[in-house]
Amino acid sequence: MNCVFVQIRCKPGTAYAVADAIALRELHSELYSTSGNFDLLMKLYVPEGKDVGKFINENLLDIDGIERTMTTLTFKAF
């Protein structure tokens, strides 16, 4: 499993609805509301051998209210 972090910017007024939709899909390990340029921070594990970009596109980006995302890949835990 590959651990990735996805920061999500929501359209104004939709952060709670987006978070609820993500929770229903059970994609995430952790999901947080954040301050700053993005509204939500999601930690998820992409199955080994799956393309990260395709996995996120197919499982996350069709949620209404998501305006933009930024994905951070991880490589090694210390």
Image: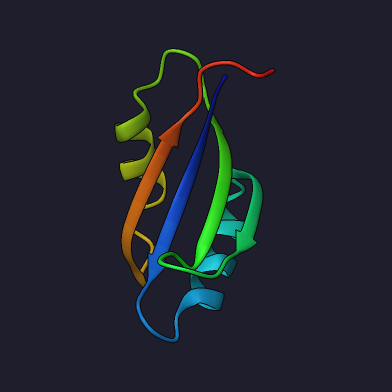
Residue farthest to the bottom, as pictured: 13
In front here: 71 or 19?
Answer: 71
Q: Position of residue 10 (x, y in %)?
A: 39, 71
Describe the colour scheme in one phrase. rainbow
Vertically, is 28 above or below 14?
Answer: above
- The quarter of the rendered structure image containing the N terminus is top right
Count of numbered circles in the view: 0
Name the residue at 45% across, 53% down. Answer: 7
Name the residue at 43% across, 37% down. Answer: 72
Name the residue at 36% across, 48% down. Answer: 70
As drawn, is 58 to the left or to the right of 46? left
Vertically, is 42 above or below 49?
Answer: below
| The quadrant where residue 69 appears | bottom left
In front here: 35 or 51?
Answer: 35
As drawn, is 19 to the left or to the right of 57? right
- The quarter of the rendered structure image containing the C terminus is top right
Name the residue at 54% across, 70% down. Answer: 35
In front here: 52 or 9?
Answer: 9
Q: Position of residue 71 (x, y in %)?
A: 39, 41
Vertically, is 75 above or below 61?
Answer: above
